[in-house]
Amino acid sequence: MKKLVILGGGYGGMRIIQRLLPDELPEDVEIILIDRLPYHCLKTEYYALAAGTAADHHLRVSFPEDARISIKYGTIQSVDLSGKTVELEDGSSVSYDKLVIGLGCEDKYHNVPGAEEFTNSIQTMDATRKTYEAINNVRPNGIVSIVGGGLSGVELASELRESRPDLTIKLFDRGEIILSMFPLKLSTYVQNWFIDHGVDVINKSNITRVEKGFIYNHDEAIESDAIIWTAGVQPVEVVRNLDVEKDPQGRVVLAPQHFLPTDDDVFVVGDCASLPHAPSAQLAEGQAEQIVTILKKQWNGESLPEELPQIKLKGVLGSLGKKHGFGLMGERTLLGRVPRVLKSGVLWMYKYHSGA
C-alpha cells in the first residue's frame, strides 16, 4: 500500500480527507493522519472559548471514520525529506510516499522581551484552554490587555466584553484605526462599537516589553491582570526548520501545484504555505481542494496542469459579541446584525457537513 501521510488535522488536512473519502481514494493508497488531538478543532472560534462564551466540546469535530484511514497521535519533531519519514517526539517514525504538511502557525513575538513568557495565547486548543482559565481567574473589575488589533484580537475583545462586563479591557493596536487592512467604513464601525461598549482601544501602540502583571506601551508601564497576545503569527517550528525555500514571512514557497519545487511528493497546505492571500481557514480549504486534484492526477499517471485557477475566497466575516458583526464580501461591506447571523450560519453549515 502507498502511504499518504497528512500532518495536522486542521482545515486543510480535514478537507483533503473529506474529498478523498469515501470514493476518490485509490485502492492501493492508505491515509495516515498524525495529530496531537483526537478531533479537528474549530480554530476560528478559539476566541469564544477563551472568553468563556463557547464550550470546549462545541469547538470539536470528529475525524472521519474509514477503514483506509489510520490516526496516529503524537507531536511531530521533524520531517526528513531525503529519507521520506516523519519523526515524532516519542522516538517513533512514519514513512510516506506522499506527504501533506498542514501544521498551522504559532504566535510571533517580534523579539519583544517577556512576550512569550508573560502572555497568553489562542493559537492552539491547549493554549486557549489556559487563556480561558487565566481570564476566568481575573479579579472582579480587573484589567485584561489584548495585544493585536486584527481579527482575533477584535473578536476576543468584543466577546470578553459580553462575558465579563466588570473587566477593564484594553486593546492595543499598531494602526491608526482598528482593522486598518479593511475599508475605512468597516474599521470605523468596529472602532465605534468598542467606544460605545467601553473597550479601551489604544491605537498607534508599540509594545516594547512585557513583565509579570505589566505591559509596556512605548515604554510606559500599564498594569494588567491578564495579557493575551494576538499580534502576529509564524509557521510552526517544524516547518521553520525545513531546509526549503521560504518567503519573508517564513512560509514555504511552492510550485503552482502546491508541492515543493524540488519534490512533487511533498505538499504544504494552510498557514505554512506561501500564497497570494493572508492565511485563513477558507484559504486552506480552497488550497486543499486543488491538492486533491493534483494527487488524483499523480496517482493516475496523468500530466499535471502548469497553472491552477486562482483560489476564490468568499469574503471575511467577524463577530462583535453575539449580536453584532462585520464582513467584507467582494467590494461590499456588511455591518451590524446580518454579518453576525451569516457567521453563525457558516459555522453551523461547516459542522453539519463535517458530521459534528
Image (spheres, grey):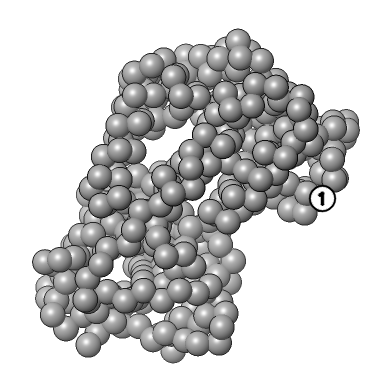
Residue 266 sits in quarter: bottom left
Is residue 266 visible from the viewing direction of this image? no
- The residue at the point 48 percent across, 42 percent down is 55
Q: Residues within 10 Å of mark 1 (few under 14, many from 20)?
A: some
- The residue at the point 41 percent across, 45 percent down is 58
- The residue at the point 44 percent across, 29 percent down is 318
Is residue 2 visible from the viewing direction of this image? yes
Q: Whole-percent x and y of residue 47?
A: 53, 39
Quarter of the image with the N terminus in it:
bottom left
- The residue at the point 48 percent across, 38 percent down is 54
Q: Whole-percent x and y of residue 168?
A: 73, 23
Q: Is residue 122 depicted above or below 3 in this figure?
A: above
Q: Is residue 139 depicted above or below 106 in this figure?
A: above
Which residue is disc 1 drawn over?
113
Q: Amino acid at mark 1?
A: Pro
- Pick the residue in front: 217 or 263: 217
Relative horizontal placement of residue 232, taking residue 115 as reference (left or right): left
Badge 1 element: loop
